[in-house]
Image (cartoon, coloured by chain):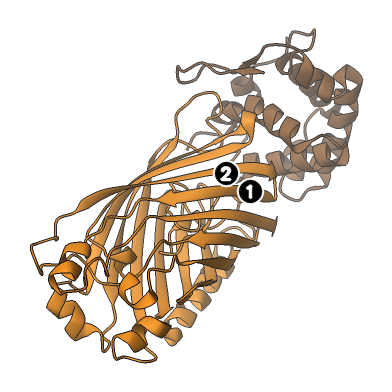
Chain colours: A orange, B brown
Amino acid sequence: MNTNLAITLITASAAVFCAGAQAETGKLLLTGGVSSIDGAAGGGLTPWAVIGTNATDGEIGGSAFITIAGTRDYGLTIYGAAVGINDRFELSVAQQDLDTRVTGTGLGLPGLRLKQTIFGAKVRVAGDAILDSDSLMPQIAVGLQYKTLGSTGLDPTLNALGAKRSGTDFYVSATKLFLGQSLLVNGTLRATQANQNGLLGYGATLGGSENSYSLQPEFSIGYLVNKNLLVGAEYRFMRNKLAKAGATAGLGNGLRSEDWKEIFIAWAPSKNFSLTQAYVDLGVIVPATTASRRQTGYYLSAQVAF
Amino acid sequence: MLFASAAQGQIIAVKDDQLYKAFGEKAGLIALMGDFMLRLLADARTGPHFKPANQQRVKEQLVDQLCSLSGGPYVYKGADMKSSHANLDIKKSDFHALVEVLQASMDAKGIAPRKQNEMLALLAPMNRDIITPR
């Protein structure tokens, strides 16, 4: 996966839009969510049950996004695209590019960039997050994300830890906009083997197998200030799969991970464009090389959707 | 305050008339529906559906319906949603378009976003009877 492919996909989304049955696709503002870091529609950190793009029943839509985030010791650039079909199926692809800065240098790999490609598929199985306002029934979707980490100088280290370079996450999400209270709520349950969302590989075997799937809950809450503006917060529980391997490798607690969280503002001036700004706290990431500094910082994402 | 029943498909009912008052009571709703109908006719997506309709009658029925839903002292006696929208080939995107037009009208009349969403919460479930089943 490289820039050319990403650009091709973004162009393809635009082509799908132009060729589509409707000149203007039909979702209400912000109801396709924004593009999460893994490329699926949802909040910034978490996939929601909403199906992305502006396509509603009987329509096909496309979306594309770019996200930049910076914490104390890392920089992250993400770009991707998605196709939404019938407001029921969503296919997405995203490329994450992590600039490891001091950690790369600390590992003897100055300038190390970790690139992860994520292919996602999501199906809405029940409910309507917006229009079922006379019941407590949420919109429910199930999805998977196939993630693969590109080959870099970090490969030998990952091999030594017994971490694989690809893996698949499975999740189920329930999302509802309580219109009467202007309140959006999402709960996601993710089954994953990933270390730091996959950026440090999948599972580990050094010191004992940590390859089983863990269940990690993720929560989002948002207040719809008006139809163009959603403010909220997200919390992703993270399992600590590399901690044991790190300790066995003599790094003490140096590879432990912590939960991810953010507070965000999502602004959609029109149906075709949204901008999300967030303050993220990703906890410690490879504390061994970053003096256990908390990785807090900014997150900025722009999405176009048809 | 909204009362929501946990049972699927139960209509949310309002406990008092605060929403009715927030919309300017009957006079406010008459003005709102007047503006709404003009916008519906002007919008390329909804215009074709509303041009052939008896617009005055639709406006009056909308006023009665919103008065009743929002806690006002009226009982809606018009046709039910299902029969009045049968065979009109209404798609989900048409329904969304109508919601957007209603939002534009409510914005124009200066109704607070929170109150707009409370009204939409009462109207949204009607989509099941309005959208033509495929």
Q: Are tags 1 and 2 found on a single chain?
A: yes
- Image quarter where the C terminus of chain A lies is bottom right
Residue A301 occupies quadrant: bottom right
Whether residue A130 is situated above or below residue A58 in the rendered picture: above
Q: Which residue is mark 1?
A: A230
Q: With respect to residue B127, does A151 lie above or below?
A: below
Q: Where's residue A66, x and y in %?
A: 54, 72
The amino acid sitting under disc 1 is Leu
The residue depicted at 21 percent of the width and 73 percent of the height is: A251
| Quarter occupied by residue B66 | top right
Question: Could you tell me if residue B84 is visible in this image?
Answer: yes
Q: Quadrant of the N terminus of chain A?
A: bottom left
Tag 1 secondary structure: strand
**Residue at coordinates 69% horizontally, 33% vertically from top-left?**
B117
At 27% from the left edge and 58% from the top edge, which residue is drawn? A169
In this picture, is B59 found above or below A196?
Answer: above
For mark 2, give the secondary structure.
strand
> In terms of depth relative to the viewer, which is nearer, A259 or B65?
A259
- Name the chain letter of the residue that bears numbered label 1: A
Q: Residue B132: x and y, percent?
A: 55, 34
Residue at the (32%, 65%) spot, across then down? A196
Residue most extreme to the left: A208
Question: Is the residue A110 above or below the residue B125 in the image?
Answer: below
In the picture, measured across the screen, residue A93 lies left or right of residue A135, that is left
User: Contact (CB < 8 A) between labels 1 and 2?
Assistant: yes
- Counting from the top left corner in percent of width and height, residue A246 is at 19, 70
Q: Give the mark, 1 or 2, whose residue is nearer the N terminus.
A: 2
Residue type pointed to by label 2: Gly
Q: In the rendered image, which residue does mark 2 sit on?
A: A222
